[in-house]
Image: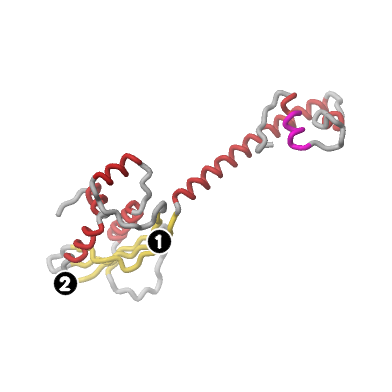
Amino acid sequence: ELLQSQTLLMLMKHREWRVQVTALQAYVKPKREAKGHFSPVHQIRIGSDDVTEKNAALDIVTKSLATYAERAYAVNTNEEEDEDLAAQSIATPTTLPSSNIKVDTMDAEFIVDASETLWFSHLSNVMVQVVHAKRERKEEMKRMEESKLIEAASVVSNELKRLLRMAANRGVSVAASFSHFDAQGIGYADVNNLIEGLSRLGIGISQPAA
């Protein structure tokens, strides 16, 4: 059966279809065997006792299988696609809700039959890590917000330093400059004093950045 990638992705979510495909898989008597390997970090295997044929082209195929596995477990964030799938009454198995997987290592076994036809046999070794998509998005947003705060604080800090240098060049003492922020003369300035003092200088800054 010839299937397009989109159709295959849809059918792979149907538990009964997957079981039937597995049950109908025919046995092919191998003339020789070959192996494909995928790992995001290339590892050189030295002193291996593996006698199966190694082929760079099969490594590329194995990489494609790893990519497909990751996409098959990807979280669907498109509500319209969710509604379309529900309308088609496809039985979606419970796998990894709100999560993705990342393939760390994958070994694919291939066989060549008597007519020199290459067949994919099975995956002999697969190592994955679960990636919580929602958690990652929250952490990424948090990092972006922190980065913006640091950038804003740096801009304000540089401007304040420039103004203090100008004041010093005009003979304004450090104590006089500090009194601009310590309006009550109590000897220290808190965050609110800093924000108010910067505001009087025409510099705006948020509470978190301050």
Q: Nearer the viewer, residue 104 or 21?
A: 21
Q: Which residue in the rendered view is the most extreme toward the bottom?
A: 49
Name the quadrant of the C terminus: top right
Q: Nearer the viewer, residue 44 or 119?
A: 119
Identify the element where label 1 is drawn.
strand
Magenta segment: 190-197
Q: Secondary structure at mark 2?
A: loop
Q: Quadrant of the N terminus?
A: bottom left
Say which quarter of the image contains residue 203.
top right
Q: 194 left or right of 68? A: right
> In this picture, is 54 found above or below 98?
below
Q: Residue at x 80, y 36 (%)?
A: 189
User: Magenta span has 113?
Assistant: no
- Would you name the residue on which mark 1 appears? 128
- The amino acid type found where label 1 is placed reads Val
Which residue is identified by label 2?
29
The amino acid on which the numbered mark 2 sits, given as a three-letter code, is Lys
Asked if marks 1 and 2 touch (Cβ < 8 Å), the reply is no
| First reached walking from the N terminus: tag 1 or tag 2 | 2
Residue 111 in picture, x, y percent from top left? 21, 67
